[in-house]
Image (cartoon, rainbow, N blue to C red):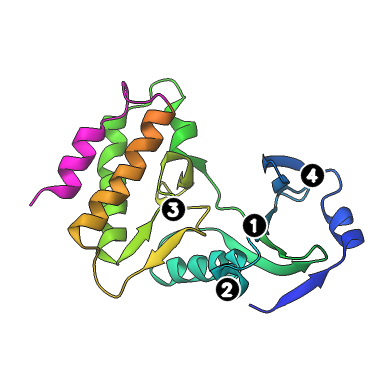
């Protein structure tokens, strides 16, 4: 997808009335626009980095396209922008409909016993396709209205030409486990059952 330049005035107009979904020490990172679409900002934090050649926004777009090619539900990219500020780009996209597993887990009568088989199947299929999704966690996995699982926030992803080797699959689950611990979900999420299902010989 070709990128187009977005002036500061045009950016201000685009985000007028928007809600800030995510921010860091540099400022807002993700806006929910009034029309329901999302604008995600990407900043190159170092002067010299791989992002100079391939901006994180381009990786985000490419990864979304590759996931769609593989039949994995994900967001729909609408536009790619170069912003006025040096090293900044943005992606406008239509979010994947549904709720994240993290959101659903807060609801009454939620059962991991019911949801775990589909989660295992999703991660198993990603690993079989050679996808190493470093940001794989419950907040980035969406249950769609069709009751299928899809992925969001897909910038931090690698595609290998063969299935993930066992050490990478294990490392991917370690990232997942750190998220579970950070969210204080060790008492409710069946991490051991997930690992057993995915790492069994």
Q: Residue at x 16, y 48 (%)?
A: 199
Q: Which residue is mark 1?
A: 45
Q: Name the mark nearer the viewer: 4 or 1.
A: 1
Residue 57 pos. (x, y %): 61, 65
- Single out the mark in the foreground, 1 or 2: 1
**Is 55 left or right of 3, judged from the image as shown?**
left
Q: Which residue is mark 2?
A: 54
Q: Position of residue 171 (x, y in %)?
A: 28, 50
- Asked whether the residues under the numbered discs 3 and 4 touch, taking CB atoms below 8 Å apart as contact, a structural biologist would say no
Label 1: state its secondary structure: loop
First in sequence: mark 3 vs mark 4:
4
Mark 2 to mark 4 CA distance (whole Å): 28 Å
Precedes in sequence: disc 3 or disc 1: 1
Residue at disc 2, secondary structure: loop
Q: Earlier in the sequence, mark 2 or mark 4?
A: 4
Give the spatial CA distance, label 4 vs label 1: 25 Å
Task: Name the front one of labels 3 and 2.
Answer: 2
**Residue 108 coordinates in the image, percent (x, y):** 43, 20
Report the mark closest to the observer, 3 or 4: 4
Measured in 3D between alpha carbons, the distance from the residue under mark 1 to the one under mark 2, in whole angstroms, is: 14 Å
Rate crowding at label 2 as few (under 14), some (14 to 19) or many (20 or more) other CA atoms within 10 Å.
few
| Mark 1 crowd level (few <14, some 14–19, many ≥20, 10 Å Cα) | few
- In magenta, the rendered stretch is 184-201
Name the residue beneath numbered marker 3.
150
Marks 3 and 1 sit apart, C-alpha to C-alpha, by 29 Å
Q: Is residue 195 above or below residue 189?
A: below
Mark nearest the camera among 2 and 4 is 2
Horizontal side, residue 54 vs residue 171: left or right:
right
Q: Residue furthest right?
A: 9
């Amino acid at each position: 997808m070709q990128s187009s330049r977005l002036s500061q005035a045009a950016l201000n107009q685009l985000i007028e009335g928007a809600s800030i979904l995510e921010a860091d020490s540099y400022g807002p990172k993700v806006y929910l626009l009034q029309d329901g679409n999302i604008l995600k900002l990407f900043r190159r934090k170092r002067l010299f980095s791989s992002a100079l050649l391939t901006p994180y926004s381009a990786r985000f777009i490419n990864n979304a396209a590759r996931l769609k090619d593989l039949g994995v539900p994900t967001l729909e990219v609408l536009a790619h922008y170069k912003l006025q500020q040096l090293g900044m780009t943005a992606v406008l996209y239509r979010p994947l409909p549904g709720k994240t597993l993290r959101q659903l887990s807060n609801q009454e009568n939620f059962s991991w016993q019911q949801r775990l088989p589909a989660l295992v199947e999703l991660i198993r299929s990603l690993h079989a396709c050679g996808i190493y999704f470093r940001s794989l966690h419950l907040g980035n996995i969406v249950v769609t209205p069709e009751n299928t699982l899809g992925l969001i926030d897909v910038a931090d992803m690698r595609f290998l030409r063969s299935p993930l080797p066992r050490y990478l699959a294990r490392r991917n689950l370690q990232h997942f486990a750190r998220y579970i611990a950070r969210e204080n979900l060790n008492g409710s999420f069946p991490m051991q059952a997930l690992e057993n299902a995915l790492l069994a010989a």
